[in-house]
Image: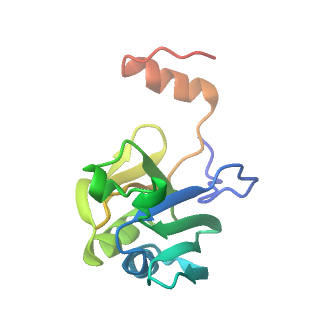
Amino acid sequence: MANNITAIPVGPRAITAYLTIKGAAAGIEFYKKAFGAKELMRWTGPDGRVGHAEIEINGTPVFISDEHPEIGVISPETLGGSGVGLHLLVEDADATFARAVAAGGKAVRPVVDEPYGQKSGTLKDPFGHRWYVTQRTAELSEDEMDKIGKSAGYKTLR
């Protein structure tokens, strides 16, 4: 294992998360407090709903809107949950996780050291979105990752 760990790798992003939130304005404020998000822009319609907003977390864009059921845009809160989670790489998983919980997030799984070179914990934000707050702790080779996976019963496909 190498000691040179890049906490948040820089590179192209072809997919941007677009979160639908019942109460998008409150969601934006939560992400600012919990994850240090920067609000880049917000369009609010005549009815007061956020039609589109953009924030940035650790250099990664995230789009946000209020629910618009008239066009099929529904939040996890209305749906009763979501099968999608967001994997957030941070410099300090313990501090970020604690800040997110203090801001109103609900701890689902505490931050623990994982055998694959990460510390990670899971929380749900107040709007039903699941976040995996993760800190890289080691750079592992493909062979090292394969050994860890096999020891846990996984089959690798490389």
Q: Count up the numbered dots.
A: 0
In-front residue for pair 128/98: 128
Q: Is residue 61 above or below residue 82?
A: below
Image quadrant where one finds the C terminus: top right
On screen, residue 40 versus residue 107, left or right, reads right
The spot of residue 154 in percent (x, y) is: 42, 18
Quadrant including the N terminus: top right
* Residue depicted at 45% across the width and 55% down the height: 134
Height in image: 92 above or below 115?
Answer: below
| Residue 58 in the figure: left or right of residue 21 | right
Name which residue lies at 45% across and 73% down.
35
In the image as oriented, which residue stretches furthest toward the front?
Answer: 70
Question: Splitting the image into 4 quarters, where does residue 62 fall?
Answer: bottom right
**Which residue lies at the image location 47% right of the left edge and 38% below the top edge?**
116
In the image, residue 103 lies at what x, y percent?
30, 78
In the drawing, does residue 4 fall left or right of residue 31? right
Quadrant of the rendered image containing residue 153:
top left
Image location of residue 43, percent across then percent down = 58, 80
Give me the residue at 71% from left, 49% from top: 14
Q: How is the image coloured?
A: rainbow
Q: Is residue 54 above or below residue 10?
A: below
Camera-side residue: 14 or 145?
Answer: 14
